[in-house]
Image (tube, helix red, strand yellow):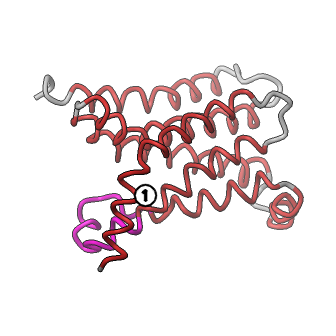
C-alpha cells in the first residue's frame, strides 16, 4: 500500500513541513523583530508555491506520461488554500485586529491587497467543491466552476508582484512558470471551450 501511494504520503509531508517549521520558529522566537509579518510572508509564499504546483500537475502528467502525478493535484491545491487562508488571517486578525476600517483602507490604497482578496475569493468555491461528492453533485458544471483556477493562480502571482518590494525577480519567476503552464494547457483549453460552445 505504501509502495503504491508513496507520492501521496510525500506530498502531505512536504506540504505540512513549512507549517511545522513556522510553528517551531514562532515558539522559539526565531521570526525576527516582526514575527507576524515574517509569518504572513512565509504562509503567503508557501501557499503560492503549492498552488502553482497543483496547477502544474496536469501539464507535467501530459509531458512526462506519469499519470499518478494528477492524483496530487487536489491535495496540493487544498494545502495551498490552507496556507493562503492563514496568510489572510495573520493579516486581518493578528495584525489588524479585524478592524474593518484598516482593512478597507488597505484595499483602497494598495492594489496588491485588492488583487489578493479577489484571488482568495475565487479559491474559496474551488476548495469547497474539490471533493468527489461535490463533483458528483455538480456534474458537468463542476468542470466549468473549476475554470476559476485559471484566474485565481495568475491573480495570486500578481498579488505577490504588486507587494511593496524592490526586488521583483522572484515574482517574475512565478509569472514565467505560470505563463508556461498556461501555454502548455492552451490547446486543451481551446478544445474544451469549443466543445462547450458547440453544445
Q: Nearer the viewer, residue 72 or 153?
A: 153
Is 141 a magenta residue? Answer: yes
As drawn, 182 above or below 11:
below
Question: Left or right: where does residue 75 sit relative to residue 135?
Answer: right
As drawn, 90 above or below 143:
above
For the N terminus, the quadrant is top left
Q: How many marks?
A: 1
Q: Which residues are magenta?
A: 126-145
Q: Nearer the viewer, residue 170 or 39?
A: 170
Question: Left or right: where does residue 118 sit relative to residue 99?
Answer: left
**Residue pictured at 29% horizontal, 80% vertical:** 199
Q: Which residue is mark 1?
A: 127
**Residue pictured at 59% horizontal, 46% vertical:** 86
Question: In the displayed image of the protein, which residue is found farthest to the bottom?
Answer: 199
Is 47 a magenta residue? Answer: no
Q: Nearer the viewer, residue 113 or 94?
A: 113
- Secondary structure found at label 1: helix
Residue 42: percent from the left, percent from the top?
64, 32
**Residue pictured at 54% horizontal, 40% vertical:** 178
Mark 1 burial class by Cα count in 10 Å: few <14, some 14-19, many 20+? some
Question: Left or right: where does residue 49 sit relative to residue 5?
Answer: right
Residue 133: percent from the left, percent from the top?
24, 65
The main secondary structure of the magenta stretch is: helix
Residue 167: percent from the left, percent from the top?
81, 27
Amino acid at each position: 500500500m505504501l509502495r503504491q501511494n508513496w507520492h501521496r504520503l510525500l506530498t502531505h509531508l512536504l506540504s505540512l513541513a513549512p507549517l511545522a517549521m513556522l510553528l517551531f520558529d514562532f515558539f522559539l522566537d526565531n521570526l525576527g523583530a516582526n514575527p507576524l509579518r515574517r509569518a504572513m510572508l512565509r504562509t503567503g509564499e508557501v501557499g503560492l508555491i503549492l498552488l502553482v504546483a497543483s496547477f502544474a500537475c496536469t501539464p507535467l502528467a501530459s509531458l512526462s506520461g506519469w499519470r499518478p502525478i494528477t492524483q496530487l493535484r487536489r491535495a496540493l491545491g487544498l494545502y495551498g488554500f490552507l496556507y493562503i487562508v492563514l496568510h489572510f488571517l495573520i493579516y486581518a486578525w493578528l495584525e489588524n485586529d479585524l478592524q474593518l476600517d484598516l482593512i478597507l483602507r488597505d484595499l483602497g490604497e494598495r492594489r496588491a491587497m485588492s488583487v489578493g482578496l479577489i484571488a482568495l475569493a475565487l479559491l474559496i468555491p474551488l476548495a469547497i467543491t474539490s471533493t468527489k461528492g461535490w463533483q458528483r453533485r455538480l456534474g458537468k458544471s463542476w468542470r466549468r466552476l473549476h475554470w476559476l483556477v485559471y484566474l485565481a493562480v495568475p491573480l495570486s502571482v500578481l498579488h505577490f508582484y504588486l507587494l511593496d518590494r524592490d526586488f521583483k525577480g522572484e515574482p517574475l519567476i512565478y509569472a514565467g512558470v505560470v505563463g508556461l503552464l498556461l501555454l502548455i494547457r492552451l490547446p486543451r483549453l481551446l478544445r474544451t471551450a469549443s466543445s462547450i460552445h458547440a453544445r
